[in-house]
Amino acid sequence: MTNFRRENLGKGYGMHKSAKIKEIVQETENVKTFILDFESDSKPGQFVELWIPRVDEKPMSIAYSDGKELWVTVFKKGPFSSALHEKKVGDLLGVRGPFGTHYTWEPGQRLVMMAGGYGAAPLYFLTQMALNDGCKVDFVLGARDKENLLYVERLKALDGVELNIATDDGSEGHKGYNTEVLEKLIGEAREGKGFKVICEGNTCRREEVTVDPIDKVYSCGPEMMMKKVSDMCFEAGITAEVSVERYMKCGHGVCGQCSVDESGHRMCVEGPVVDNETARKIKEFGSYHRDSMGKIHNF
Amino acid sequence: MNLETDFCGVKFSNPLVVASGVIGVTGASMKYAVEKGAGGVTTKSIWMKEHKGHPCPIIVANEHYMVNAVGLPHGGIESGKHEIEEYQKNQPAPLIANIVATTGEEFALTAEAVSEMNPDIIEVNISCPNVEDEFGRPFACSKDDAADVTAKVRAKTKLPLVVKLSPNVSNIVEIAKACVDAGADGLTLINSLGPGMVIDIDMREPVLANKVGGMCGPAIKPIAIKIVYEVHKALPNVPIIGTGGVTNGEDAIEMTMAGATLVGIGAGVFYRDIDIYGLVRDEMIKWGQDKGVNSLNKLRGTAVK
Ligand SMILES: Cc1cc2nc3c(=O)[nH]c(=O)nc-3n(C[C@H](O)[C@H](O)[C@H](O)COP(=O)(O)OP(=O)(O)OC[C@H]3O[C@@H](n4cnc5c(N)ncnc54)[C@H](O)[C@@H]3O)c2cc1C
Ligand SMILES: Cc1cc2nc3c(=O)[nH]c(=O)nc-3n(C[C@H](O)[C@H](O)[C@H](O)COP(=O)(O)O)c2cc1C
């Protein structure tokens, strides 16, 4: 990362590049995906800083990039995201990045994605990259209800992905938290076998299948969900990576705003993606965070 | 080369300190900078009451300079106290508490409250705009205002007192003298320069949300060197924290030769990440070895004639 900086100083590093919005996809009532003309060497788990002049600049996870275009999937919340939702195809945004650490995997592994909220977007990017490396992926997607599920159709279109859905109200898939699905997956992997529902026409049957061990679990979404995933993986002895998001401003590790206790690591540089061992040493993970003034708030 | 440095009676294992506003938001982040080689740390400017700061972008930078308009965000005195206490658990290196306020009275109150937290040194940031003045001129731009704030803070603290001055004046030596006469034990030179502006020509807009911001980083080093030199020449017994554009060992040696006792590094973190403190320390040691200089103390002010 230090080398990345040295190599790119003098080539615009630290300045914005302007990116044209190529396409806008309405995902749900409050979520849009923006496809930007933006060349980068981005990896899943990294983020960009998006700038709308006279509004603000905010960190956004990279939802996909093929090197030439870059996607971000954005929830409409406050002033910045609302202003972004007003943008039209052809409008320009200022972009800096990519910044931060990324998810890691080995070819041929069995991976489990634990996604909540906009976490589905970066984990979709990770899933695509891992599939290219011959990995098998169980994608566990959680949301309040059916209407708020993100990326379902895109995930269904991928070969080599088992999609598991959990909704709080049971309007689609498992009724309850997606961590309950993870519990089942971990149990089956431990047993080495599980059941699969196979449907032909209107008749469905359960069939016993052999289940491979889980090599790694990835989590992105609400912090309490990630904390639960972190605990479960620790107890089950499974390697995991989580994305620890804190209030970020500069993206360079200079302003100190996103430092966590007690390592002092800056989540825009030494994060947001950290391995579970590191996450478990972050005292505030799943407990509290600091706002734009550095004041502490509990989750 | 031995880098141990005494500043106002406080011992530093090396002269490199984290400049205010960089990294120092939390106790843990300041400890991290010490782990990475800093000889001491400065807190972000502490306000009595919480202070919002500017929207983003707060920083724009390239290989030559950084322009920043963070807007002094801070959670207020209780938040400052919490972070200082966290740092002081197994305190790894001296702590400089930087304070800011908009009136002389508020500076005095803040200094009193912060002194109770037992930092090693108090640094008074008088280089921010003074809202009492209708033109928004910083206290550091007038020798009378600067002396007035210094005297008010002096009355409230027994700690070593350092005043941080602005380079945006024509009479820095006069202002430095006024602060010392009013009770300052040392001076930090310099706060950021300008302000400056960067326009993004594609977006056709100033980049910083605040439009203008303080310049720092490599481009301002010659100005920082010149100011440290001038003030050291005029006040050879007043210790200086030389800050501005230092990114490598040679810069730090140069700052020392101009008369600095401690050397602050802020924007340097952009150029070499937080490792910069250890890297600069090692480069200074290597320079000393190569040149046969065994103590930094022998270099201080040697260029000042
Ligand atoms: C690494 C990272 C990746 C992110 N990825 C996405 C993404 O893919 N999609 C998405 O919709 N959002 C993402 N966010 C959150 C996003 O940056 C903003 O929080 C959000 O757009 C709110 O801004 P606002 O002005 O609309 O709302 P506001 O009302 O200003 O903020 C709403 C809440 O968002 C949080 N927030 C605001 N600003 C920041 C900031 N600079 N850094 C961190 N948190 C902040 C605060 O907790 C605040 O209470 C990400 C944040 C981080 C740190
Ligand atoms: C991001 C940033 C934030 C800063 N915030 C403060 C601050 O809160 N208080 C202060 O006295 N100086 C602040 N400064 C000024 C620095 O402490 C320093 O005086 C100046 O940047 C010159 O040194 P440099 O070139 O090494 O950065 C800030 C500088 C930067 C880059």
Image (tube, coloured by chain):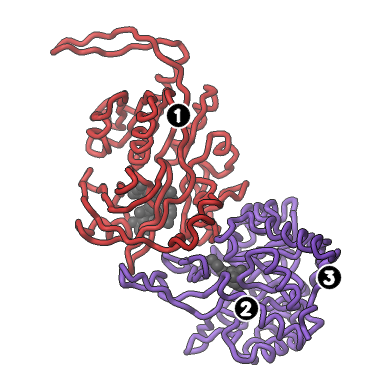
Chain colours: A red, B purple
On the picture, is A181 further left or further right than B118?
A: left
The residue tagged with tag 2: helix, strand or loop? helix
* Distance CA(mark 2)–CA(mark 1): 52 Å
The residue tagged with tag 1: helix, strand or loop? strand
Residue B88, can we see it? Answer: yes
The disc numbered 1 marks a residue on which chain?
A
Closest to the camera, between mark 3 and mark 1, is 3
Q: Residue at x 81, y 60 (%)?
A: B289
Q: Position of residue A155 (x, y in %)?
A: 27, 32
In the image, farthest residue toward the front: B290
On the picture, is A234 further left or further right than B12?
A: left
* Callout 3 crowding tier (Cα within 10 Å): few <14, some 14–19, many ≥20: some
Question: Badges 3 and 2: C-beta atoms under 8 Å apart?
Answer: no
Determine which residue is flagged by label 2: B222
* Callout 2 crowding tier (Cα within 10 Å): few <14, some 14–19, many ≥20: some
Residue type for callout 3: Asn
Q: Residue at x 67, y 89 (%)?
A: B175
The answer to whether dots 2 and 1 both sit on one chain is no
User: From the Cβ of disc 3, is ligand 2 less than 8 Å away?
Assistant: no
In the image, farthest residue toward the left: A201
Determine which residue is flagged by label 3: B297
* Distance CA(mark 3)–CA(mark 1): 54 Å
The disc numbered 2 marks a residue on which chain?
B
Q: Position of residue A247 (x, y in %)?
A: 47, 54
Residue type for callout 1: Val
Q: Residue at x 61, y 80 (%)?
A: B223
Closest to the camera, between mark 3 and mark 2, is 2
Residue B293, quarter of the rendered image: bottom right
